Amino acid sequence: MKYLKASIYISSTIALCPVASFAQDWNAANQALVVDIETSVSTEQLRFLLNNKDVTSRFKQTQTGQFSYQGNGFPVPSGINTLIVYEVNLGQWLEIHNQKIKVLTRSGFKTANWTVNGSVALDAQLDADYKGDAFKPEQDRFYVGNMQLSVGSQHTRKDLSIHSQANIVGASKQENALRFSERGEQADKIDLSDYLVSVEKGKASFRVGHTGFGSNPLLVDNLSNRGVHLGYQFNSIFDIAFTQQNGSAIVGWNNFFGQRSSQHRIAASTLGVEVFPNKPGKLRVEMSYVDGQVQAIDDFAVGQVSDVEKNQGWGLRIISQLWEDRVRFDGVFASSRFTNPKDNALLLEDEFQLVSVEQTTDQAYQVNLDLDLITQNEQGTRLFTVSLNLGQDKIDALYRVIAAGPSADQKIERLGLRGDLASGQWQYGFTETENNIDHLPTILTSNTKSHSLNYNVDLANAFQSETFEVNNYLPSLNVNLQKVHQMAINMPDTEFSDFNGDSHLPDQVTKILELSANWSFNTYAVGYNLSYSNQDNRQIGRQQADFSLINHSISQSLQMFESLTLNLDLGRARNFDHENNTAFYNNNAALVMSYGFSSDWRINLGSSLNKDYDNFGLSTSNALTLNMGVDHQWSFNLYGRDVPGQWYLRYAKQRNKSEENIFAFNTFTQDWNITSGISLTF
């Protein structure tokens, strides 16, 4: 075999360039590709493959041992390409060179990718009928169309990266428009749901759109209204971030940057300190500040702000991981100054004497400590492991913030244990919650203690044979126990409250047992679930108002053959009212069949029965549902892209009949409808 030597480089002219400039660096899109080969092999014996495509015809020999790529409208694609040169001798291909070609886009980016995804759907009700007391809509026949479009991009160049994402939704009916509840008939049928543009250059970052900010759960916690975000990493120790966002969640094209109103805006900043930069996460300190005001206007996500709110606050968070991450600490503190400024929308006539809201400054803290006391060994054979969690929260009675959602006026203490036991996992938790932490005499102080214990294990895998065969007759088990005691620990002053003696003081104990067992065979699976709860009312005067509930359910699935599946669910529940010596029963059953008579056609049938009654025959209720449908899925190629689609036709019927024998109040409803729809995803 003859000796060959090849070098490849990019040049703006035919003149030779250093090989290293091509092999390691990114090159401009308008530079020419040149291959330098030292060989006595005939040029007819060389083959050039660019990204596994034969481009030999585009290489021309410019001088002895030198070849130039002649694009002629087919330039080397931007990004990282692979060029392989072969010598072909007597039908045998011998690779003589393999080289990566890094080419920038015409705008100078290493990568420039755009993605467009979306879906369109048309759903219609072809016919319907309503009888008895069933609600009848204005139209029996109608159609609705919906559209979703997602556009994203990614651009990188040296230390600059730009990412963007936007989601647009559309509806054919005005009442289904994204902002119909806000703008009514003026709402756009095609609207912007959310968007985000992220720019990072070196140590600096900038984001605009629906960006999340904040990791202090008591002050500013993942604030994700529309706005701007700035960040800078000074070094391995210090970093800082700032955001300014709209005062409430918004959608649509209006107020595109979230900066329209200075009276409805939230600003926040965070300074982070990595105390041990060589061991990130060992000890990190974050200091946060928030300043904002929100108006009493409709909120897209929440509903409505009841009054103008103004808030300034600062917070501190300390996060630490020690002893090979076996000790983890997370401590949070926040102080908030909150007030309700004058709201002209709430000014009433002079005869109403409004009381001004006083500004308050309140504090809150949250502490969590996790300890891995007994860990798993390297072989994974230790039968028992345990981790401990301790925590405490305390939030002042009047503590409020506008950039997070902690519940005020409570003290919470937590104890948790978890780990492995044999082949299963166990978990124990204890929580004690108390309100009215200022012990005001006119307010009820309640205390809630909750215990929970859970264990789950897959017995089939736990008792494998020596040949690692699984015994499918052994189930996977899950057992859950819970006890909750809610009680009053004070008696509010009857002179200044609505409480009247011990009979108004709550005292209740609830006990819950849940058990599930599941078996799985080749074509058959069955599961049994049992739940039992007992509500023991200890309130004076209501000691007999107790309830006991027990529920049994069985679910079965049978794969009769590859294309036919049957599912059967059976259930029975009994709720006993001890005070009235009345037992309420519920029996239910559901059967579902799915048959795929080809790879893209499927028939679905389903029916359910539900019956409620009591031991005295005071009332009865019966419900029946029936569903039938056929689905067809397909896919076609559009400009080199697969576009999957789905079509369906369904029939649904509901029938409900109830009889109340004390006041002879009987109802009957029955309705059915036929619906169809088509959707495309791209």
Image (spheres, rainbow, N blue to C red):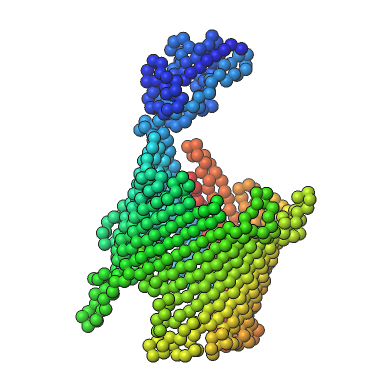
- Quarter where residue 556 is shown: bottom right
Residue at point 45%, 27% (across, down):
24
Q: Position of residue 458 (x, y in %)?
A: 69, 58
Residue 250 visible in the snapshot = no
43 or 263: nearer the viewer: 263
Residue at point 43%, 12% (across, down):
62
How many numbered tags mark residues here? 0
Q: Position of residue 430 (x, y in %)?
A: 56, 70
Residue at the farthest right position: 466
Q: Position of residue 50 (x, y in %)?
A: 50, 25
Residue 628, compared with residue 116, is above or below; it is below
22 or 579: nearer the viewer: 22
Q: Position of residue 656 (x, y in %)?
A: 58, 74
167 or 650: nearer the viewer: 167
571 or 562: nearer the viewer: 571
Image quarter where the N terminus lies is top right
Judged left or right of residue 161, residue 611 is right
Residue 440 visible in the snapshot = yes
Judged left or right of residue 471, residue 216 is left
Residue at point 55%, 88% (across, down):
542
Residue 212, compared with residue 389, is above or below; it is above
Residue 77, compared with residue 602, is above or below; it is above
Residue at point 52%, 15% (across, down):
5
